[in-house]
Image: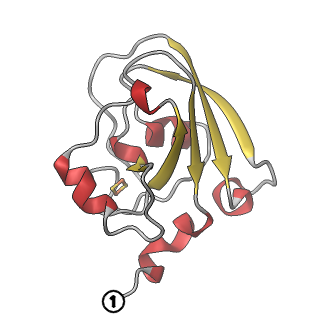
């Protein structure tokens, strides 16, 4: 599936980003739960993951119109763009919402530091599991 890339200028690829996958098989086809990547300012966490073959679900293509790219930011929230009202509204629709819930497509790296985030196991089929 295609997705919208962030448009701003890119910095150097020197920001450590650690991803914990609750369902590594579903997202990568491997059993590797922890991935250490290097991101650049101006890049979204969704882009970084997809470019490294970590398939975080992204039903709307990264335009803040679903909540399937829901993640938990466990460290380095200050290194990410602030969430907007539109993102907050979408996050509220995600199952398992927590204080550190964000949408991966809306989190752009803004400065250095280490970012750690978790991809919940139900990310893969969140659309079907949202109660009506
Ligand atoms: S991919 Fe739809 S909101 Fe992020």
Q: Quadrant of the C terminus?
A: bottom left
Q: In this rendering, does residue 65 appear at all?
A: no
Res. 67 image quadrant: bottom left
Q: Quadrant of the N terminus?
A: bottom left
Residue at 49 percent of width and 59 percent of height: 57
Q: Of helix, strand and loop, which one carries label 1?
A: loop
Q: Residue furthest top?
A: 12
Q: Residue most toward the bottom?
A: 132
Q: Is residue 31 left or right of residue 23?
A: right
Horizontally, is 65 left or right of 68 in the view? left
| Lateral position of residue 85 relative to residue 36, left or right | left
Residue labelled with disc 1 = 132
- Give the farthest residue toward the right: 31
**Which of 40 and 92 lies nearest the eye of the viewer?**
92
Residue at the (40%, 35%) spot, across then down:
44
Q: Position of residue 92 (x, y in %)?
A: 31, 65
Q: How many marks?
A: 1
User: Up-down: is 128 above or below 24?
Assistant: below
Against 100, residue 128 (above or below) is below
63 vs 104, nearest the viewer: 104
Inspect this view and state whether residue 50 appears. Answer: yes
Residue 31 picture location, percent across and down: 81, 54
Q: Position of residue 127 (x, y in %)?
A: 42, 75
């Amino acid at each position: 599936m295609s997705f919208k890339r962030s448009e701003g200028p890119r910095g150097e690829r020197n920001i450590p980003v650690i991803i914990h996958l609750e369902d590594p098989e579903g997202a990568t086809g491997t059993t590797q739960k922890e991935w250490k990547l290097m991101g650049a300012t101006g890049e979204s966490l969704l882009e970084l993951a997809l470019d490294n073959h970590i398939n975080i679900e992204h039903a709307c293509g990264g335009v803040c119109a679903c909540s399937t790219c829901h993640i938990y930011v466990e460290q380095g929230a200050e290194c990410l763009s602030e969430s907007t009202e539109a993102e907050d509204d979408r996050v509220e629709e995600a199952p398992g919402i927590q204080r550190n819930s964000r949408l991966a497509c809306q989190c752009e790296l803004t400065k250095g530091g280490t970012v750690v985030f978790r991809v919940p196991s139900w990310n893969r089929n969140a659309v079907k599991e949202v109660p009506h």
